[in-house]
Image: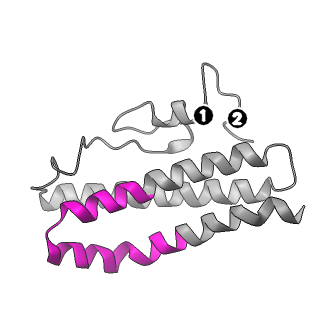
Amino acid sequence: AAGAGLPGGSRAAAVFGGVGGGGARGFMASSSASSADAAALTPDEVKKKMDEINDNFSISREEIESALEAAGTTYFNEEADFAREVTERTLGLYYALCEALPEGERASTQRAMGMKMEQLKAELKLLDHAHDDH
């Protein structure tokens, strides 16, 4: 699997190691410390966070696809665990942004991104039974 066997530690450590930049396999680490820090987000900061979530959404989908392709192989569990980890991180970024926004902006963000996040959760659920078929 691509990214497996990274030198010096786990794939997750490589992915989440860099704050604010791209980690291994391109997963972006968030630079915000907490939703309290995000209470007064400027429109540019909101856009930046939405772009980060969208980038991570794409990466999460790729990781889920990679795990599904590994169903029936010895790599499946590792791929599935990694896909779950990056997807949970992506969902966490989305929920943190929603919590940090005032009600009107939150509703707008949920309309713009909510269906994608539900899609991500549904695709992740496919992993729960993918290995059973093989």
Q: CA distance from mark 1 to mark 2?
A: 7 Å
> Crowding near pointer 1: few (<14 within 10 Å), some, many (20+)?
some
Residue in view at x 62 percent, y 68 percent: 123
Q: Quadrant of residue 54?
A: bottom left
Provide residue 70's location: percent of width, then percent of height. Answer: 80, 52
Provide residue 133's location: percent of width, then percent of height. Answer: 87, 66
Residue in view at x 15 percent, y 78 percent: 104
Amino acid marked by disc 1: Arg
Amino acid marked by disc 2: Ala
Figure coloring = one colour
Q: Secondary structure at mark 2?
A: loop
Identify which residue, 55 or 12, lies in the foreground.
Answer: 12
Residue in view at x 62 percent, y 45 percent: 82
Provide residue 97's location: percent of width, then percent of height. Answer: 27, 60
Residue receiving disc 1: 11
Q: Does residue 132 lie above or below 38 as drawn?
A: below
Check if mark 1's residue and mark 2's residue have beta carbons within 8 Å.
yes
Identify which residue, 111 or 100, lies in the foreground.
Answer: 100
Q: Quadrant of the C terminus?
A: bottom right
Q: Secondary structure at mark 1?
A: helix
Q: Which residues are magenta?
A: 91-120
Taking the magenta stretch, the answer to whether it contains residue 113 is yes
Instruction: Indicate left or right for 124 with 28 as reference.
Output: right
Residue receiving disc 2: 4
Taking the magenta stretch, the answer to whether it contains residue 116 is yes
